[in-house]
Image (cartoon, rainbow, N blue to C red):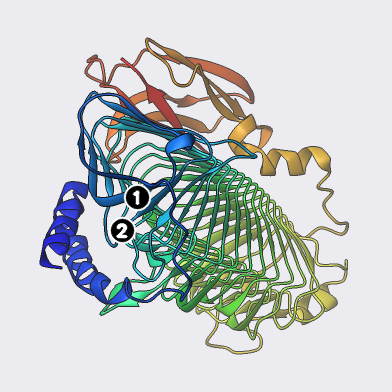
Amino acid sequence: MVGWLKEISTQKQAFALPKKEMKDLRKFTSLIGIIVGIGFIVSLPAIADTTYVSGHITSDASWTKVNSPYVVEENVYVDSLVTLRIEHGVEVRLDSMKRIEIKGTLNAIGNETDSIIIGALDTTKRWSQLWFKDASAGSLSYCKIEYAGNSAIYDDSASLLVIEYNTITNSFGVAGGICSAGSATITGNIITNNSGFTGGIFTSGSAIIRENIITENSAVTFFSCGGDGGGIWNSGSSIISGNIIEGNSAALEGGGIWSSGSPTITGNTIRGNSASYWDGGGIYSKNGSPIISGNIIEGNSAGNGGGILSCGFSTITGNTIKGNSGYGGGGIYSYGSSIITGNTIIDNFVVYSGGGIRSYGGSSIITGNTISGNSADAGGAIYVCDSFSVIKYNTITDTTASAICVHSDSALIDSNNLYATGYAVWNSSESDIYAYHNYWGTSSNDTIDMKIWDFYDDSIKGIVHYEPFLTEPLEFGVEERRFFADAQNDRLEASPNPFIQSTIIKYKVSDVEAYHCVFLQIYDLSGRLVKTLVNENKKAGCYTVNWDGKDNADNKVVTGIYFYRMEVGNFKATKKLTIIR
């Protein structure tokens, strides 16, 4: 027992996590000996014509269907510069806490009708993992991987790892399914019923996580360790796109996705996930700058941020955020300075404040959204507290209580359609609010006065200044909505990307921002400014600028991931750029 715990501890050191996370992992691994004994009481698999394997593989080898099943009695090591191939139809059974460790290459390629099975010799005694060491490589396709006890697939910064069309289930570990510190491509897998510190996938690198079904996984806690990211945990710059992330749970934060990095989260269906104790039922973003776009985020629940909770700088654009619930911020809880634009935010519910959006402690920009049918005790559509928010070009309808409630600090409420059945704007702050150019559902000053709660209702509160106002609703047609929803794609784009020598960045300045100063800058992964490409006033129109891969000191930058960021007026956008030398 002591031997494999020591091996697991060595794996965690190789994974190179920060000291605090290492302490948590050591606590976690000390419990695995207890957990691995918990399994399902089933009969042992029938073993006939069995091939027993163990030790080092020092030259290229194949595990064939004719010699299947293979039983791993002791750890198997695929040495550097060696390839192990596993044919379709092969069954691999590993004894208790045994692993296959890859320093060379492992290619396990099944097919749709004849998959590879990798599992426990005795399902009451979990095996350990497929451990891809630093600089290793591999491809896993059409495999059924089950009953692992220390993360089914453990990627310790493999140079090239493709994980596609597999079923990964009933496994346990740092992440029950996949734990990756590298740049693995994870595509088309079914990852279900796994549990651990993180339920489905743990990634601290730049993985591509695309078109997977990630369901019914759970992130659990052990002695104050773990419990975040029921479906996915990310601290890097991963691309998370086109996945179905459904029915996952986190004991603490991020029922669907937990992120502390700068991932791109786009085109996913994130539904029915829960953060049972804390925050971020669908997505929890901590101190990063993710781009969250084009997702369906529906029916998730949490303490705060039923749909999304963002702590930091997030760009949240073009999503449908529907039917989420919590105590505050049913659709979105922004604890920082998010850009929230072009979303449809409907039928979300909270007990206290911010049925649609709760903005707290930052300077959020809330533009071009449709916010309808949300409910809360205060701020059925939007609740602003200890922050200055810009609320512009939104259509707000059918809210309970006050539509927009400003609890403290202030807000600019400009050019919105406000169809509130009760109070449209409730000023609970001592600061004045400027609410110009809005349509209030009426052209009558007396009626508008009745839709506002401010100084004239409580003399210690600030005034809501609403003149001039509009007498007809603003028309946000197809083109306007496309402008908001596709702002990231249509207004800022680099090609080629990735690039070797240079890339051309196209950007657009709208009529609203004409003659404002445009900033277009390059940053590295640490947030350090690398290059300023544009810093000047521009007319409305489309422009291009070339980046030659050099910094402000005219030095060539190294291979890696960078971000190009545009700011003009109220518009801000950040996108990822890769250079290869």
* Secondary element type, mark 2: loop
Callout 2 amino acid = Asp
Read off the residue under disc 1: 71
- Left or right placement of residue 555 versus residue 293 in this view: left
Between residue 249 and residue 387, name the one nearer to us. 249
Q: How crowded is mark 2: few (under 14 residues within 10 Å), some or many (20 or more)?
A: many
Read off the residue under disc 2: 95
For the point 66% across and 85% down, which residue is it? Answer: 456
For the point 30% across and 14% down, which residue is it? Answer: 581
| Residue at the farthest top position | 501
Between residue 466 and residue 508, name the one nearer to us. 508
Between residue 312 and residue 229, name the one nearer to us. 229
For the point 84% across and 48% down, which residue is it? Answer: 475
- Image quadrant where one finds the N terminus: bottom left
| Residue at the farthest front position | 49
Please report contact status of discs 2 and 1: CB closer than 8 Å, yes or no.
Answer: yes
Q: In this view, does 501 lie above or below 357?
A: above
Q: How crowded is mark 1: few (under 14 residues within 10 Å), some or many (20 or more)?
A: many
Could you say where residue 556 lies in the image, as x and y percent from the top left?
25, 15
- Left or right placement of residue 37 versus residue 327 in this view: left
